[in-house]
Amino acid sequence: QERQNIIRYWLENLRAKQGESLHNIQFLEGQPIIPELAARGVIQQVFPLHEQRILKRLMKSWVQAVCEAQPLGEVLTGVAWGGTWGSQPCSPPPPQPLTPADEICDYFGVKIAMYFAWLGFYTSAMVYPAVFGSILYTITESDQTSQDICCVVFAIFNVVWSTVFLEEWKRRGAEFAYKWGTLDTPAESIEEPRPQFRGIKRISPVTSAEEFYYPPWKRLLFQCLVSLPICLTCLSLVFFLMLGCFHLQ
């Protein structure tokens, strides 16, 4: 995913030089080429293709990871911890993951791999409330008092289970983030302006690099002369419609 984002970034930031044209489309200087061609219908879609060989291998390893997961007894003793226990002799071994997270990360990227890692962890952790709820349902008597007591017990169990689950997923998620090198990388630091962003070129006072700059007074002028009147008109229309409904009632 990261490689695809880099390629897409370079494609969308191909900007025209002065006087360039294509298919009778005259570009302005600095105008992004790919978005303009897509808007004019010259290009229909831009999307990456799957590597079928790698995808088939990933699907095979994914099925094997699910089929080779440990028995229910081992899941019940270890799945909720979801991490590496260290070298304590009495600690149980970590459970086998239900998803090949590293291979998913290599192919789809960190975001999708993190989602499926969470999904596998959540699916495994659901064994606890499923087993406890089944046992509670079996031993519950038919009278209303027993059912109320069991409902309270199961609710308390769910509160404890959800708390433990969230804390253990924080640990597992931090392990994955550290392993994949994204633990201290805020998303804001790698965001780039949209290719469709319009402005004048200037030297950034922060990075000393060339960038497109849109004056704040133009944005404020548009908000005051366009956005604000439209919002006030819509609010007034809703207000008078509400008064009309009250009058009809």
Image (spheres, rainbow, N blue to C red):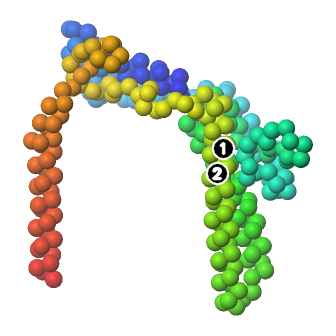
Q: Using the image as rendered, state which of residue 213 and residue 2 is in the foreground.
A: 213
Q: CA distance from mark 1 to mark 2?
A: 7 Å
In x, y percent, where is residue 131? 76, 66
Residue at 12%, 54% (x, y): give it.
232
CB of mark 1 within 8 Å of CB of mark 2?
A: yes
* Vertical arrangement, residue 42 with respect to residue 224, above or below: above
- Residue labelled with disc 2: 167
- Residue labelled with disc 1: 171
Q: How many numbered circles are shown?
A: 2
Residue at 73%, 59% (x, y): give it.
127
Answer few, some or many: residues within 10 Å of disc 2's Cα (few below 14, many 20 plus, some between 14 and 19). few
Dot 1: what SS? helix
Q: Using the image as rendered, state which of residue 153 and residue 20 is in the foreground.
A: 153
Q: Amino acid at mark 1?
A: Arg
In x, y percent, where is residue 245? 15, 75
* Vertical arrangement, residue 149 with respect to residue 23, above or below: below
Dot 2: what SS? helix
Taking the view exactly as shown, the residue that stands out farthest to the front is: 88
Q: Amino acid at mark 2?
A: Glu
- Write down the quadrant of residue 182 in the picture: top right
**Quadrant occupied by the C terminus:** bottom left
Taking the view exactly as shown, the residue that stands out farthest to the right is: 89
In the rendering, which numbered label is found on residue 214? none
In x, y percent, where is residue 86? 81, 38
**Quadrant occupied by the N terminus:** top right
In x, y percent, where is residue 149? 68, 82
Q: Is residue 42 visible?
A: no
- Write down the quadrant of residue 150 in the picture: bottom right
* Vertical arrangement, residue 192 with respect to residue 21, above or below: below
Residue at 60%, 39% (x, y): give it.
114
Residue at 46%, 28% (x, y): give it.
47
